[in-house]
Image (cartoon, rainbow, N blue to C red):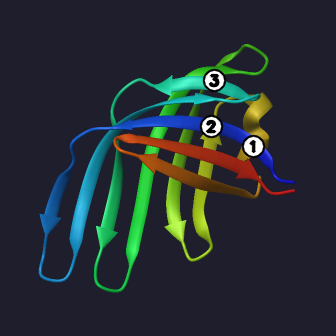
Amino acid sequence: MDELIMTINVTTYEGYCVKGGKMKVYMVPFTAEAEGKYFKGATEFRSYDTQRENENEFFLSARYILRGKDFSGRKCSIFIENNSTEEGIIPTIVTDSPELAFLESADLYSQLETDSNKVTVRIYAKK
């Protein structure tokens, strides 16, 4: 069974949209709080989920920085970029925590659940 790395509870706000001739682009502002056995923290400012949609494809990319504490109690930051791919939603993680450095090279994937203006993101490491 894959390991749950963290759960991120996201609150979205009214977004912005540009409709071109062949594509729509949405920018959805959000804040987030993360918790898990390795890290607990939150965004300090609004971040954006960018979604591009045309008649053939849908692409999303969310980028944000969480500040909090790693499992050793040390203050740290984590940058997360979630991108949709043909294989699903794949996160890239960069952190200044030596204890969490393994996340930068781990084989990760994200799962999303949506409900109104709430989104839950779960990041897993493949075993």
Q: Do the residues labelled 3 and 1 touch (CB within 8 Å)?
A: no
Give the secondary structure at mark 3. strand
Q: Residue at x 33, y 56 (%)?
A: 50
The residue carrying pointer 1 sits among few (fewer than 14), some (14 to 19) or many (20 or more) residues within 10 Å by Cα, namely some
| Residue 27 position in % (x across, y down) | 26, 53
Q: 95 or 43, which is in the foreground?
A: 43
Query: What residue is rendered at 82% in x and 53% in y?
Result: 2
Q: Is residue 121 left or right of residue 37?
A: left
Position of residue 92 measured from the top left corner of the image (x, y, whole percent): 60, 53
Viewport quadrant of the N terminus? bottom right
Q: Alpha-carbon neighbours of circle 2 within 10 Å: few (<14), some, or many (≥20)?
A: many
Mark 2 is on which residue type? Answer: Thr
Instruction: Identify the residue position indicated by label 1 in the image.
Output: 4
Distance of label 2 from label 1 (alpha carbons): 8 Å
Image check: 57 left or right of 24? Answer: right
Residue 113 vertical position relative to residue 53 in the rendered view, above or below: above
Type of amino acid under label 1: Leu
Q: Which residue lies furthest to the top in this view?
A: 73
Marks 2/1 in contact by CB < 8 Å: the verdict is yes
Spatial CA span between label 2 and label 3: 9 Å
**Quadrant for the C terminus in the image:** bottom right
Dot 2 or dot 3: first in sequence order is: 2
Callout 3 amino acid: Lys
Mark carried by residue 7:
2
Q: Which residue is drawn at 31% across and 68% down?
A: 52
What residue is disc 3 on?
40
Place residue 4 in its image quadrant: top right
Where is residue 24 drawn, in percent x and y?
21, 70
Q: Nearer the viewer, mark 3 or mark 1?
A: 1
Taking 18 as reference, is 96 above or below it? above
